[in-house]
Amino acid sequence: MGWLSWLAEQKIDEAVRNGEFDDLPGTGKPIVVEDLSGVPEELRVPYRILKNAGMLPPEIVLRKECLELEDLLAACRSDQEREEIGQKLNAQKLKLRMVEEERGWGGGAYLEYADKIKDRLGGN
C-alpha cells in the first residue's frame, strides 16, 4: 500500500471514530446495483451522469409520452376528445419511429425482435 492510500485509510478511520458517517442518507439500506450490461462500457459514465441529472434519451421520452397518450385515449368520453388525443398520439408515434430509424432500429434484426425488446423495456 502506498503512502497516499495509507493516508486516505487513516483519514477514513478518523472520520468513522468521530461519527462523521453516522447520519448519511441511505444508512442501513441495501445498495441498489444498477444493471448497465446493455450500455457499452465507454458510455456508462456519461449515461449515469445524464440519468442522475434527469436527462433521458429522446426515444425514451417519446415512448413515455405515447404511453401517457394511450392512457388518456382509453379514458376519453367524447368522440372529439378521442380524435384530438388520437391525432397527438399518432404524431408522437411518428416522431418515435423517426428517432428509431435514425438510430438504425427501423429494419433488419430490430424488426425481428422489436416486440421482445419493447416488452423488456416496458413499452408497446
Image (tube, rainbow, N blue to C red):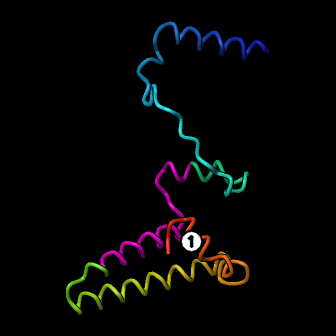
Q: Is residue 19 left or right of residue 100?
A: left
The x, y position of residue 2, in whole percent, is 79, 15
51 inside magenta stretch: yes
Front-lying residue, 69 or 48 = 69
User: Which amino acid does the dot numbered 1 rest on?
Assistant: Lys
Residue at (33% x, 75% y) in the render: 71
Q: Position of residue 76 (x, y in %)?
A: 24, 82
From the viewer's perspective, is residue 85 above or below residue 48?
Answer: below
State the image coordinates of residue 95 (x, y, percent, origin top left): 50, 82
- Does 45 appear above or below 101? above
Quarter of the rendering occupied by the N terminus: top right
The stretch in magenta equals: 49-72
Disc 1 marks which residue? 118
Q: Residue at x 20, y 84 (%)?
A: 77
- Report the side of 45 relative to 70 (left or right): right
In the image, what residue occupies the spot 55% across and 65% down? 121
Q: Is residue 85 magenta?
A: no
Of 5 and 120, the residue lying toward us: 120
Residue at figure coordinates x 66%, y 76% from the top left: 113
> In the current view of this chain or complex, which residue is farthest to the left?
78
Answer with left or right where residue 73 lies relative to residue 56: left
Badge 1: few (under 14), some or many (20 or more) residues near its Cα, within 10 Å? few
Secondary structure of the residue carrying numbered label 1: helix
Q: Is residue 57 above or below residue 71?
A: above
Residue 6, image x, y percentages: 71, 12
The part of the image, by quadrant, that contains residue 105 is bottom right
Report whether 102 appears left or right of 27: right
